[in-house]
Image (cartoon, grey):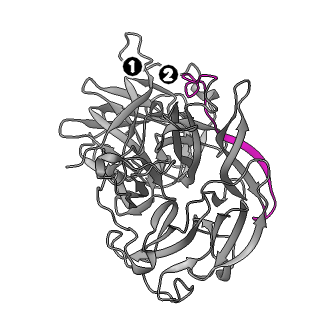
Amino acid sequence: MLLTACFCFCLSSLADGQDEAKQPSDVTQMKVIDIGTTKQLFVDRKLIASDRDIELVMHRPRRDGRVLIEADQAWEAGGRIAVYSSVLRENGKTRIWYDLLTPTGAGPYDHNRRVCYAESDDGLHFEKPRLGLHEVNGSKANNVVLPGVIGGCAVWIDPQADPAHRYKTQTKVYPSGQFHMHSSPDGLNWTKFGRLEPGPGGWDTQSIVFWDPAMERYALFTRYWADNDNRAGRYRTVRRLESDDLINWDSQTIVLRPDENDLATYEPRTPQPPVDYYGADVFRYEDVYLMLAQAFWHWNLRPDRDRLGPSTFDVRLAVSRDGKTFERVGEWNPFLSLGSEGSFDSRAVWAMPDPVRMGDELWIYYVGTNRDHDGIVDPTGGGEPLSGISRAVLRLDGFVSAHAGYQGGQLTTPPIRFDGSKLELNVDTGGGGSVLVEVLDEKGQPLPGYSHEDAVPVVGNSVAMPVTWRGHTDVSDIAGRPIQLRFHLQDCHLYAFQFVE
């Protein structure tokens, strides 16, 4: 059985020997947060005004272990699946666009690099349709959708576009380093509509673009080479840019760079810090921005080489409320770590944009390989280079939970204003845990009928568990007014809450 690892962070105990958590001195002066019916996640401390014996816990997804897509067709002979691949789930199908790299010589750009397409009804068993669009080795009987020496793709749906240009993707072109934008009516037939020169920061990664409804502009997350202050060399960072037309980009902000902890083991003799950031999948999830950051590790000189090792990739989790300032989660422990020695993903894991909802789960597809960035193959797997697409499974909303142990804990939200008639929790109480929910007024006092004594214990494991007070679930009588929620947790994980109609 695959297990889920957890990491605690942002531990805050406001207890000082009292039974109740400390309450802000003047609740009425706190800004009311309008949440409507949007689900609220405990990925950071925004929804925690006070707490006692509560810790925020990052949860790692469970690995599947199977290779779902690999280079196994005649037109893929000699090739390998590279990291810049992407996935969408729509109309009952999981659609994957994968980066196929086929070497043609010994040089760094002596290869063909095409985008190929696969699809599946269940997200596990994929077909590679022969689309007849582009010729490979004298035949169009293949699944290639974007030919040429290009750096993969990151397919997304543009809600601002007309149907003929609904699908978009962007890619780096080798060896020019140009950044090309493409559009499509179906995700298969693509037309280039924009080209950007490399510029000072470069585009050398899987760049992520989406329409940001909060900004009412397009957001682009891509590579930026930053100066290394007083140290030698440069390092990789992730930057955000904005645009109204997908052609002209402005408002550059560096959103992820090596911090002092990353630089702690840095020595001047090495040209780079021990870790920098090769890229990141950034996406909107409910009302937050989540980042699956690709950490690139290189901290020692390899014998007979002028490059640093071990030259591996894993995935870290960060969160933001504005898409510009990101907070590292789980004490920056791996969210998705390398596979075991000898496995197909022992040297690199790369999260594909974006996580896909399947029922009450999130499936995080990723590209794994036993080759590191320098092309050195994990010797414990027999020396054969391996690569493919697999998945890791996470509970719906399951990135982070507010957790209390067996001794119990308490969490109070800031003032909120909601719409809807029922309150639901994404919660796992295990066999012996529970949650009680009080509703407080703007002065922090329990509302009649919603006190601790009125609350019925919530027990169980569900992504949408209803909350009850003395036999009723209807909260429409307090909708639209400022309230606070006080959660009394015992031996449980609370991932999110949501008011629903």
Q: Is residue 441 visible?
A: no
Do tag 2 and tag 1 residues touch (Cβ < 8 Å)? Answer: yes
User: In the figure, residue 68 lies in which quadrant?
Assistant: bottom left
Q: Amino acid at mark 1?
A: Glu
Specify whether residue 267 is painted magenta: yes
Question: What's the magenta region?
Answer: 244-268
Instruction: Report whether 154 appears left or right of 10.
Output: right
Q: Is residue 122 above or below residue 365?
A: below
Q: Which residue is at a point 44% across and 58% down the rendered structure image?
A: 367
Q: Is residue 283 magenta?
A: no
How far apart are the alpha carbons under marks 2 and 1? 9 Å
Q: Quadrant of residue 228 in the image?
A: top right
Q: Looking at the magenta stretch, what is its main secondary structure?
A: loop
Any mark on residue 20, and which?
Answer: 1
Considering every residue shown, the one lying at the far front of the view is 304
Relative to 168, say whether 296 is above or below. Answer: above
Task: Inspect the image, locate mark 2, and give the three-letter code of the amino acid beneath it.
Answer: Gln
Residue at figure coordinates x 38%, y 53% from the top left = 396
Q: Residue at x 60, y 31 (%)?
A: 273
Q: Residues within 10 Å of mark 1 (few under 14, many from 20)?
A: some
| Residue 453 or residue 23, whichever sits in front | 23
Return the mark for residue 368. Answer: none
Is residue 180 something one can see in this rendering? yes
- Report the side of 112 relative to 364 (left or right): right
Q: Which mark is residue 23?
A: 2
Q: Position of residue 113 (x, y in %)?
A: 56, 69
Q: Nearer the viewer, residue 493 or 154?
A: 154
Image position, residue 501 (x, y; %): 45, 60
The structure residue drawn at horizontal position 64% and vertical position 61%, both measured from the top left corner, is: 210
Percent across and percent down for residue 337 are 39, 43
Residue 8: x, y in percent? 39, 30
